[in-house]
Amino acid sequence: MRTRLALAIVFAAPALAGLTLAPPPLARTQSVQVEERGFDALTRIPSATLVRAYQARIARIDKAGPALNSIIALDPSALAQATRLDAQPRTQPRGALHGLPILIKDNIDTAGVPTTAGSLALAGNVPARDAPLVARLRAAGAVILGKTNLSEWANIRSTRSSSGWSAVGGLTRNPYALNRNACGSSSGSGAAIAASLAAAAIGTETDGSITCPSAINGLVGLKPTVGLVSRTGVVPISHSQDTPGPMARSVRDAAILLGAIAGTDRADPATAQTDAHRTDYTARLRPDALRGVRIGVLRFAVGTDPHVAAVFEAALADLRGQGAELIDIKEFKELDDLGKAELTVLLTELKADMPAYLATTRTPYRTLADLIAFNTADAAREMRWFDQELFVQAQATRGLTDPAYIKARADSLRAAGADGIERMLRETRTRALVAPTNGPAWVTDLVMGDHTGDGGAGNLAAIAGTPHLTVPMGQVEGLPVGLSFMGPAWSEADLLALGYAYEQATHRRRPPTYAAHLPR
């Protein structure tokens, strides 16, 4: 197993210094421009050429130069995958992602490449098979380029963690300002795609982990309805809220990627209705999709940053300019009460769900208690910057039959769903809700942890299990901020259509500058 691991980890983190390996030699190839290019342009380039170009860009930008540190491992078979795809006769049917190099967050099983969730406890976890969503990517013609760094254990280990740091991968930096945070837990996916290190990436979200790093890194990100995409082979936090989703530089690319990964999986009961709802998510992408649409404006979620508020007001003016009718929603009284109930749900389900995943690994760890013991024994590396108080709290929970858990789940689901998103949509007769996704990236502080600020209402969609799309809406002193579109369950096609119309009218995305720091 150690030999296989050494082959798989092309770039080792400082914590795995014993496995320091050089990048694979890049075959000579003509220079090809991949920066800021979308799927339509990239599919015209041979896949092997793309793989070599992205590998060279990763070596230049991620490991040297700005040293974003967004990629935790490269798949050593990527070039072979690409070569096979290039050899297919053009007369054969081709998938929507044919030849496109895609990055996978390192909490999703990918055959032959370690799935670590950023923890040294899983450093030797090399799955023999793909998670169903990865198998779907391959079936659509994608090349799996590698795995992205993440907030360790998807940011569920400590209340004082710094997003983007893991013991295996180190710290991912924001490509817009290297002293700023890339947000978590899909920080590596966000930074890598912002820097054009692959065509697109897959992230995962329990609450904010796709939408926050997408917005902060100037990307389009979609947290789907829970159950639209299989969670089998994904390191879990919560079966009530976990979902993978696409992260890309445009709405169209995100829609294509979503179409590839969505589908029913017998091993994941949440996906039972998926095939009845999945569709061609590109079919309704029209520049005039906002015309005549009523949209609810979540005024209570704007936050206190006047710079973000100003950018949001400009976005609302753009929506009106495209023919949307905006309805203000000024308050949501239960917003402050959701956090405690949600945490009870997440910690209870973490303890209950983790053993099922660990049982699929070749590691000696089978329970959350085993992981806590590992972290304690290897505290110098694992708990250098922050502790594991959330793990400890989760271990103390009483299981899925505990009345306190059952009540917390019912209360939070009602407040966010039936009495939250669903009620607001119904009472205002609107098709979607909009708000700032979050504020701009904060200065990374490994000692004190994240300083995320206020604003945004994405936790409503996270708790309710409903879709949430973020699209670039501008910058605050050089730092991207996103506009959120939220709707009822299975409304991904509708949200993507609205987001596409907004994107095409505004084109707010700007490439990263790789500034050493920004003074704000």
Image (cartoon, rainbow, N blue to C red):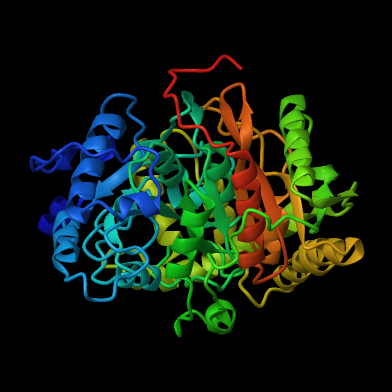
The answer to whether 453 appears left or right of 326 in the picture is left
**Which x, y percent locates residue 494?**
66, 64
Residue 384 point in image, percent of width and height: 41, 34
| Residue 158 appears in the rendering | no
Residue 196 quadrant: top left
Location of residue 455 in the rendering, given as x and y in whole percent from the top left corner = 74, 39
The vertical placement of 245 against 264, above or below, is above
Q: How many marks?
A: 0
| Residue at 55%, 25% in the rendered image | 443
Q: Which residue is depicted at the point 32% across and 50% down? A: 42
Q: Quadrant of the N terminus?
A: bottom left
Quick one: 335 or 323, which is closer to the camera?
A: 323
Q: In this view, does 514 lie above or below 488?
A: above
Left/right of residue 217 with respect to residue 86 in the rendered view: right
Q: Is residue 32 visible?
A: yes
The percent coordinates of residue 492 (x first, y second) are: 62, 65
Which residue lies most toward the top here? 519
Q: Is residue 190 left or right of residue 417?
A: left
Question: Residue 487 falls in which quadrant of the image?
Answer: bottom right
Query: Is 502 drawn above or below residue 135 in the view shown?
Result: above
Which is nearer the eye, 334 or 429? Answer: 429
In the rendered image, the quadrant that contains the C terminus is top right
Between residues 465 and 311, which one lies in front from this camera angle? 311
